[in-house]
Image (cartoon, helix red, strand yellow):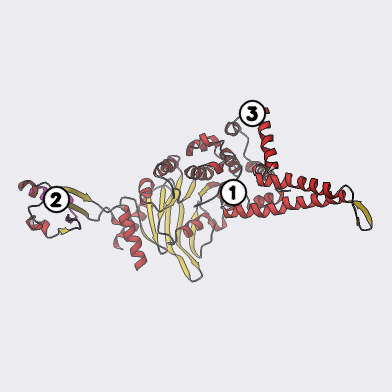
Amino acid sequence: MIISWLYRRFRAWREQRHPTTAPSSVSRVTESSRPSAAARGPLALLGHQVRFDLLASFRNPRARFFTFVFPILLLVVFASVFGNHGTTTIDGVRVSLSRYFVGGILALSIITAAYASLVITVATAREEGLLKRRRATPAPPAGCSAVRRSRRS
Amino acid sequence: MLTNSLDVAVAERLATSNSSHAVIEVRDLRKRYGDKEAVRSIDITVRAGEIFAFLGPNGAGKTTTVEILEGFRTATGGTVEVLGADPAHAPSGWRERIGIVLQESGVEPGLTVAECLELYAGYYRAPRPIGETLDLVGLREQAEQRATALSGGQRRRLDVALALVGDPELVFLDEPTTGFDPAARRAAWEVIAGLRALGKTVFLTTHYMEEAEQLADRIAIIAEGVIVAEGTPQTLGGRDLAGARITFALPGGPSMDDLPAELAKRAGHEPGGRVALPSTGVAADLHLLSGWAIERELELNDLEVRRPTLEDVYLNLTTQGSSS
């Protein structure tokens, strides 16, 4: 697919510019003497969870595609096919079709990202036993699921 | 069942004489699912710093018991105390002190091994340093790999690492080496033995007798919801008191009737033409037997003395349990 091809090209280009010689995260962690997220309070814990869930989400090609690429693709296709010469009437006001599509597609992509992906990830996490493992930790269960619910938007 | 009650009595005496305190204390635990009583009054005591192996066939109530101890299920009756609290109504901070390796759990998608540990370390107030945890399970080299790219054995080691990153006092390991190749199993045993060196208490469930024998200080066997035996790997089920079996092959000439009278009474033929001799005084019997053989200038081929293995004891106990 052209999108994945473009993405691979982009990755290769980025790799060229910034070779991944960043300090290993192990040494970064072992050297830090900062108290853990849980020790710094519920807000820090929330931030901690958001950080890693976002990281995992960005690294998931499917999530990345449907969150970022797919809506833009839809916008380009719809706006270029219908947008140039066409208007529609909403509540008695004439609006150009391109404007009409922008709003609709934006709303659609937010809903997809926030809810459809949520259903998939929570179901997968449950099936694979990830939720149970998190329940085995002292992290409050409500916090984990709340973050999952909010992170996809 | 006489030997079992003996074992229990011995274990109880040990419990009272030992000064280290009980980490897990279970009395008269019962769990009922509808009509089925999965766990029927079991007692368990696990003391600080010991590795306790919990064995039993599938469906014997093993997982139910462990999940009650972990606070994932509630008991129908009896008292359960883990680290001084009832797991079903544990105070906050209780989970800081235990680590759980579940029977099967997926890995965090998209995160590297080090990131997984960093994520879980954040859940605990006083986590163990991540580099140290990686060294403990031998995953330092894989720290930057995606967790999903690990091999089966490495994933299991990551599971152990995630349970240890909170620096718990008590670790539950639910069948930690199922599906491992022999080399990976050895490596996992070293990790678990390392926990003992750190002074952790380990509650281990397993199907492998060899594993229990290698690692455990004490073993309990559950069958049909009751504990049928408890003891050290050496004494379990009266194994140390049970008789041994001497087997050998007689070359051509003399028949079994030529044996010294005292041995001939007990001797019997085994399939394959070998002679089997159940014995409770191995030294005396061997002396008699070898004296007899030297007198006749015989060679006793394939002479073997065998005591019941832990597996023999286990199979014996668990099949007894299911037939009663």
Local SS, label 3: loop
Q: Are marks 1 and 2 on the same chain?
A: no
| Pointer 1 chain | A
* Disc 1: which residue: A138
Q: Is residue B108 left or right of residue B102?
A: right
Q: Residue A139, how many percent across, how many down?
A: 61, 48
The residue shown at (41%, 64%) is B224
Label 3 Cα crowd, 10 Å radius (few <14 / some 14-19 / many 20+): few
Label 1 Cα crowd, 10 Å radius (few <14 / some 14-19 / many 20+): many
Q: Say which amino acid is labelled 2.
A: Ala
Q: Quadrant of the N terminus of chain A?
A: top right
The residue shown at (42%, 57%) is B44
Q: Residue A132, how many percent across, how many down?
A: 57, 53
Q: Say which amino acid is labelled 3.
A: Pro
Range drawn in magenta: B270-291
Residue B320: quadrant of the picture = bottom left
| Pointer 2 chain | B
Label 2 Cα crowd, 10 Å radius (few <14 / some 14-19 / many 20+): few
The CA span between labels 3 and 2 is: 76 Å
* Disc 2: which residue: B284
Any magenta on residue B276?
yes
Local SS, label 1: loop
Q: Is residue B123 left or right of residue B138?
A: right
Q: Say which amino acid is labelled 1.
A: Pro
- Disc number at residue A20? none
Sooner in the amino-acid sequence: mark 3 or mark 1: 3
* Disc 3: which residue: A19
The CA span between labels 3 and 1 is: 38 Å
Verify CB contact (< 8 Å) between mark 3 and mark 1: no
Verify CB contact (< 8 Å) between mark 1 and mark 2: no
Give A36 or A63, whichever is nearer the viewer. A63
Any magenta on residue A130?
no
